[in-house]
Image: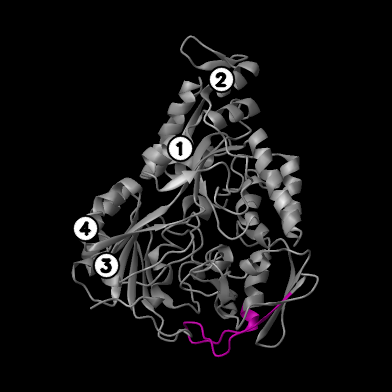
């Protein structure tokens, strides 16, 4: 679970956009929704990326709009060629992947794309000096080399079943990014790519603006300009959409419901792997007790959260793998059992005090739970979780803060976090649970340490045998029942409200970082707006 995945700023998609007028500085988005140009659009998002450099993580899951990967994901989340001309040729032992590259592709500065750019990108990501929090996702990669200008060969250390899915990683130009500091150079905010859109401006905390790339190898998009207005507060985003300052926005269920009667707009619900979870750091005297974690795991009423907070737009979560995924381990669902939670705590020596809060050896069963300011879904989850815990005799003090406030406290304090990535169980679980990544930024925020899980995660990523992989990930999920490092709460459907003038749109199965890589604008380069 990386910084970008937790914050929803993950490397992913941005689209194309209208430059906002000076007046729009206080009203991000201004104008397209009120009869503006038909070839432009403005959408409201909740988060923005930390960087726009693929070398630092942006575009690692594909669909970055500024860039392309060797492969991309279609509407059904199936791999398709992008900068490669076809899916890779894989050797019989699963250790060599060969890609033929598309010819005639140019970066937005007019320079040609070649195999050298692919080699540069992957080698730079793997360089320990590069500040990429997702480097371990390419742990299987031993070497990458160019064979001429149109062929790239990857050699793996071990058979890694989902490797082809990792090659949706956005490709950076060596002639630009290779000539500056990879971590701090201007490329991180002024990128050059081969994608359908070109960044024209980025006002941090306010908006990202784009224009269609006239030289795009896939054809110039019909939507010529696109703005992604960064509006962190859910209520403000809904207000801007209703006022016509936005053509579309991501909204929580309660606010999206307010547009049901608006015939000029349509609501899209996207299935996701996006979960909300509570980190329970092992360094804390209360959350570090396995009995407390087990008790909280069954004291929480997940279905009530789905019904009341999500208004049915989601499902209970018992781990990072959704219950409707083929990788979900049946039988690992946790019942809501308040009496059972009390019994676990009693047997572990956590006895109720005069105020109803349990204590053990002089330590009160009390701890803070941080959630992101302005995020209603996180706030509502945090408050509901605290309410359920109180019934079991555990005092949780929900507190709002910015990430600047929360991050220094993550080692010892619980956080209402989010994550989730479709595609392969390795994507969701390795960064979240591997003990060696405990405290590594937003990876393994709970400092979870379970040797059985460590081994299963390694087994799952080091074989191509489907049965062996299933057994490994079943083991991980069953261990989380016995020793939960997190309390997983819900998997959330993403709701988007968009102006009807863009016609019938679609959504993909989405990751956590909603609004950037995802949304009905995941394929904005293919939109055909109505006059």
Say if the magenta span includes residue 360: no
Q: Earlier in the sequence, mark 3 or mark 2?
A: 2
Mark 1 or mark 4, which has the lower sequence index? 4
Mark 1–mark 4 Cα distance, whole angstroms, equals 29 Å
> Dot 3 corresponds to which residue?
500
Magenta-highlighted residues: 97-117
The residue at the far bottom in this view is 104
Which marked residue is nearer to the observer: mark 1 or mark 2? 1
Location of mark 1 (residue): 303
Q: What's the residue at 59%, 30% (across, down)?
A: 293
CA–CA distance between discs 4 and 3? Answer: 10 Å
Residue corresponding to mark 2: 342
Q: Is residue 125 depicted above or below 495 in this figure?
A: below
Q: Is residue 57 left or right of residue 455?
A: left
Q: Quadrant of residue 522?
A: bottom left
Dot 3 alpha-carbon crowd within 10 angstroms: few under 14, some 14 to 19, many 20 or more: some
Provide the major secondary structure of the magenta segment: loop
What residue is pinned by disc 4?
Answer: 262
């Amino acid at each position: 679970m990386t910084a970008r995945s937790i914050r929803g700023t993950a490397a992913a998609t941005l689209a194309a956009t209208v430059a906002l007028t000076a007046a729009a500085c206080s009203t991000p988005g201004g104008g397209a929704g009120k009869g503006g140009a038909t070839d432009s659009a403005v959408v409201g998002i909740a988060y923005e990326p930390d960087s726009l450099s693929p070398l630092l993580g942006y575009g690692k899951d594909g669909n970055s709009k500024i860039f392309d990967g060797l492969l991309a994901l279609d509407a059904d989340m199936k791999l398709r060629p992008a900068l490669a001309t076809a899916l890779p040729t894989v050797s019989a032992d699963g250790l060599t992947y060969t890609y033929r590259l598309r010819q005639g592709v140019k970066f937005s500065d007019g320079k040609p794309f070649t195999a050298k750019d692919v080699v540069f990108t992957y080698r730079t990501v793997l360089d320990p000096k590069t500040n990429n929090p997702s480097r371990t996702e390419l742990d299987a990669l031993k070497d990458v080399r160019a064979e001429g200008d149109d062929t790239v060969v990857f050699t793996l250390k071990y058979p890694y079943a989902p490797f082809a899915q990792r090659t949706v990683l956005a490709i950076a130009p060596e002639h630009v990014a290779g000539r500056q500091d990879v971590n701090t150079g201007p490329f991180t905010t002024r990128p050059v790519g081969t994608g359908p859109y070109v960044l024209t401006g980025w006002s941090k905390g306010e908006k990202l603006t784009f224009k269609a790339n006239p030289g795009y190898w896939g054809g110039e998009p019909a939507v010529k300009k696109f703005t992604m207005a960064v509006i962190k507060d859910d209520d403000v985003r809904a207000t801007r959409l209703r006022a016509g300052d936005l053509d579309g926005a991501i909204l929580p269920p309660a606010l999206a419901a307010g547009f049901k009667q608006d015939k000029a707009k349509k609501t899209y619900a996207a299935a996701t792997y996006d979960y909300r979870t509570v980190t329970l750091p092992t360094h804390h005297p209360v959350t570090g007790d396995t009995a407390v974690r087990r008790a909280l795991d069954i004291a929480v009423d997940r279905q009530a959260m789905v019904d009341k907070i999500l208004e049915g737009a989601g499902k209970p979560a018992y781990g990072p793998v959704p219950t409707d995924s083929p990788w979900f381990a049946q039988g690992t669902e946790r019942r809501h059992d308040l009496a059972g939670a009390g019994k676990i705590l009693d047997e572990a020596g956590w006895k109720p005090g005069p105020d109803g809060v349990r204590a053990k050896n002089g330590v009160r069963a009390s701890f803070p739970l941080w959630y992101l300011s302005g995020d209603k879904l996180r706030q509502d989850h945090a408050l509901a979780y605290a309410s359920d815990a109180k019934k079991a005799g555990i005092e949780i003090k929900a507190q709002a803060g910015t990430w600047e406030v929360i991050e220094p406290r993550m080692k010892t304090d619980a956080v209402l976090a989010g994550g989730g990535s479709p595609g392969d169980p390795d994507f969701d679980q390795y960064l979240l649970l591997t003990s060696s990544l405990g405290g590594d930024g937003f990876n393994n925020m709970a400092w979870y340490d379970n040797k059985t899980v460590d081994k299963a995660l390694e087994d799952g990523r080091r074989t191509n045998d489907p049965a062996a992989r299933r057994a490994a990930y079943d083991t991980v999920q069953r261990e989380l029942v016995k020793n939960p490092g997190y309390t997983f709460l819900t998997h959330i459907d993403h709701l988007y409200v968009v102006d009807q003038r863009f016609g019938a749109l679609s959504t993909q199965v989405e990751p956590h970082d909603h609004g950037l890589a995802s949304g009905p604008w995941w394929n904005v380069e293919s939109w055909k707006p109505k006059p």
